[in-house]
Image (spheres, rainbow, N blue to C red):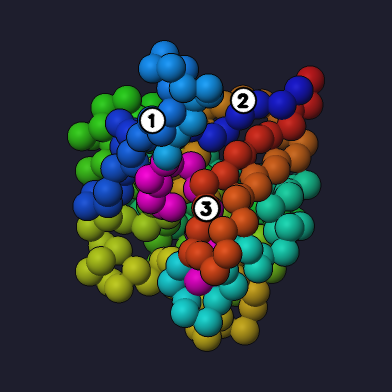
Amino acid sequence: MFVDMSYPLSPVMPVFPGLPLDEFKPHTRMSKGDESNTTMVNHFLHNGTHVDAPFHFYDKGLTIDQVPVENFCFSKPLVIQKKLSDGGLLAVDDLKAAGTALYDADILLFCTGYFENRSDISFYTNDFPALSKEAAVFIRNQLLNVKAVAIDTLSIESCIQGPQLNFIVHKSLLDGDLYSTRPVNIYEDVNMGAILNKKIDRIFAFPIRFTGLDGSPVAMVAEILQ
């Protein structure tokens, strides 16, 4: 059985503070006598369920069309579940609580419980939980099987501390000059509610291959063991 972990894209979905909203513009409509229904979409790449490529915060990093396709397929997913309130940060000890499975995992799924607030846009977009700098560095340097991380908030990084600290969490995961290990791709605004209390076998999260760009919306699907 497969479950969808991606949210539908919409002009009224919550977005990271200050980012532009998406726009859907009808191009042709059969109701107006046209032969078909077609639409123009003005989409900001970091709205909705999406993946950050290394190029997002590393000018020499791989763009979304250059990331190997196997980096979007995961056979050893691990859910890190910890209920966090406004401004809470996932720490290294929160990751280590998963035990030895942490070192085999190829994607870490951070479930803070904040997805429950997504319908309340003003609340969901204000000082949401995120990953600590220390945890990001730990993942990059110590968890060498991890290809990606995912979180149920608008960003892996605090919307308050991120700009203040020059987006150090994103850079710790993506920047090729900071560490000798491989970069770790980032999935944000993921529907973790779809997988709670389920045994996950595999996850697939494929982007659109935009040439030379920094990210993409994704269709993230989990295969569940029945």
Q: Which labelled disc corresponds to residue 66? A: none
Label 1, on which residue?
26
Q: Give, as a three-letter code, the residue at label 3.
A: Ser
In this orientation, which residue lies closer to the viewer: 148 or 141? Answer: 148
Separation (CA) of disc 3 from disc 2: 28 Å
* Label 2: which secondary element: loop
Instruction: Estimate how packed mark 2 is, as few (under 14), some (14 to 19) or many (20 or more) residues with alpha carbons within 10 Å.
Output: few
Q: Is residue 46 magenta?
A: yes
Label 3, on which residue?
216
Q: Residue at x 55, y 76 (%)?
A: 61
* Label 3: which secondary element: strand
Q: Which residues are magenta?
A: 41-55
Instruction: Estimate how packed mark 1 is, as few (under 14), some (14 to 19) or many (20 or more) residues with alpha carbons within 10 Å.
Output: few
Label 2, on which residue?
197
Q: Horizontally, is 153 left or right of 183 in the view?
A: left
Q: Is residue 92 above or below residue 205?
A: below
In this orientation, which residue lies closer to the viewer: 172 or 51? Answer: 51
In this orientation, which residue lies closer to the viewer: 42 or 117? Answer: 42
Counting from the top left corner in percent of width and height, residue 67 is at: 66, 65
Quadrant, the N terminus? top right
